[in-house]
Image (cartoon, rainbow, N blue to C red):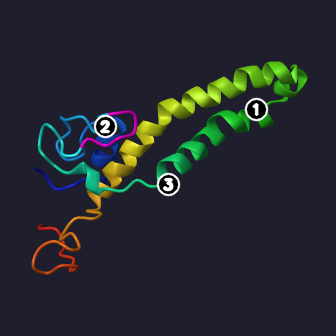
Amino acid sequence: MSKPNLWRGMARGFAGKCPHCGQGRLFRAYLKVESPCAACGHDNGQYPADDAPPYFTILILGHVVIAPLVVLPVIWTLNPVLVLAVALPTVGALALILLPRVKGAVVGLHWAIHKNEGVVPGQGEDSGAWAPPEA
């Protein structure tokens, strides 16, 4: 495989593909990472996404949907029930669409910076020692 590239890894993850090979699926369920990759065998489950995907999803949605609701003057002239009836399902649907893509990008980022690669603590003769990835 080629040397890890930050943008390529994030783009592949955003597309739901394995950041290592770009061929296999990254997710086997909505947010469950496929580990190992069916195409190349790379262990994508080693890259923790934790709280970053929901945080970035909320950050993006806040700028794309909520900011215009607050800033645009036409919104303030409409019936608040109508605004909520349109805005809440829109935000919910966009969050559900965007969350797996953002998680894929975070996994791709971790792949590109070699997060969690090396010796797994408790395994091998140097149990607990960390070894940098081979160049």
91 on left or right of 13: right
Magenta region:
29-34
- Hey, what amino acid is under mark 3? Asp
User: Can you identify the residue that label 2 sits on?
Assistant: 27
Give me the residue at 62% from left, 36% from top. 64
In the displayed structure, would residue 85 be above or below residue 64?
above
Label 2 near label 3: C-beta < 8 Å?
no
Mark 1 highlights which residue? Answer: 69
- Kind of element beneath mark 3: loop
Q: Quadrant of residue 22?
A: top left
Q: CA distance from mark 3 to mark 2?
A: 17 Å
Is most of the magenta stretch helix, strand or loop?
A: loop
Image point 32% across, 57% down: which residue? 110
User: Depth check: 97 or 8 in front?
Assistant: 97
Q: Report the side of 90 relative to 13 (left or right).
A: right
Separation of residues labelled 3 and 1 (CA atoms): 26 Å
Residue 5 percent across, percent down from the top left: 25, 53
Q: Secondary structure at mark 1?
A: helix
Mark 1 Cα shell of 10 Å, populated few (<14), some (14-19), many (≥20): some
Left or right of 86 on screen, residue 94:
left
